[in-house]
């Protein structure tokens, strides 16, 4: 899914990305997705500013089984292209 980053929490135990996604009916839903630990992402070149509010991103992952707008992120495509995510 593609949306606009509203916030990224670069903290333990998992980095969490929040973004607004426009629905087909024009409404917006805030989604969140979690990645691996920040120290693993730092070793791959991530910083707390890798994704900033306003950035357009595409996240691919597994949605929570209860249907809530939460993903376990598997792939991130940011303004600069694909970013390493690592498995949890």
Image (spheres, rainbow, N blue to C red):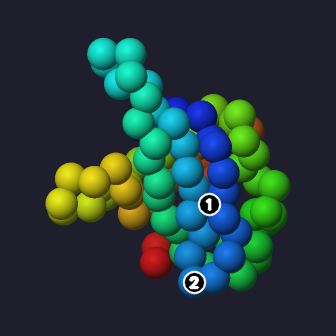
The answer to whether 67 appears left or right of 29 in the picture is left
41 above or below 49? Answer: below
Question: Of circles 2 and 1, which is in front?
Answer: 2
Q: Residue furthest front?
A: 27
Residue 85, horizontal then vertical, whole percent:
56, 63
Looking at marks 2 and 1 on the same chain, the residue that comes earlier in the sequence is marked by: 2
Q: Residue at x 75, y 46 (%)?
A: 52
The residue at which mark 1 appears reads as 84
Q: What's the mark number on residue 57?
A: none
* Quarter of the image where the N terminus is located: top left
Mark 2 secondary-structure assignment: loop
Residue 74, horizontal then vertical, whole percent:
44, 59
The residue at which mark 2 appears reads as 13
* Distance (Cα) linking label 2 and label 1: 18 Å
Q: Residue at x 71, y 34 (%)?
A: 54
Of 87 and 62, the residue lying toward us: 62
48 above or below 1? Answer: below
Q: Residue at x 57, y 56 (%)?
A: 17
User: Could you tell me if residue 81 is visible in this image?
Assistant: no
The answer to whether 46 appears left or right of 68 in the picture is right
User: Could you tell me if residue 46 is visible in this image?
Assistant: yes
43 above or below 66? Answer: below
Q: How many marks?
A: 2
Of 81 and 6, the residue lying toward us: 6
Q: Residue at x 70, y 69 (%)?
A: 10
């Amino acid at each position: 899914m593609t949306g606009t980053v509203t916030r990224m929490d670069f903290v333990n135990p998992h980095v969490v990305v929040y973004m607004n996604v426009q629905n087909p009916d024009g409404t917006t839903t805030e989604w969140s997705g979690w990645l691996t630990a920040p120290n693993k992402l730092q070793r791959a070149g991530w910083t707390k500013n890798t994704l900033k509010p306003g950035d357009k991103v595409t996240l691919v992952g597994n949605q929570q089984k209860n249907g809530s707008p939460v993903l376990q992120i598997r792939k991130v495509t940011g303004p600069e292209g694909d970013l390493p995510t690592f498995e949890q």
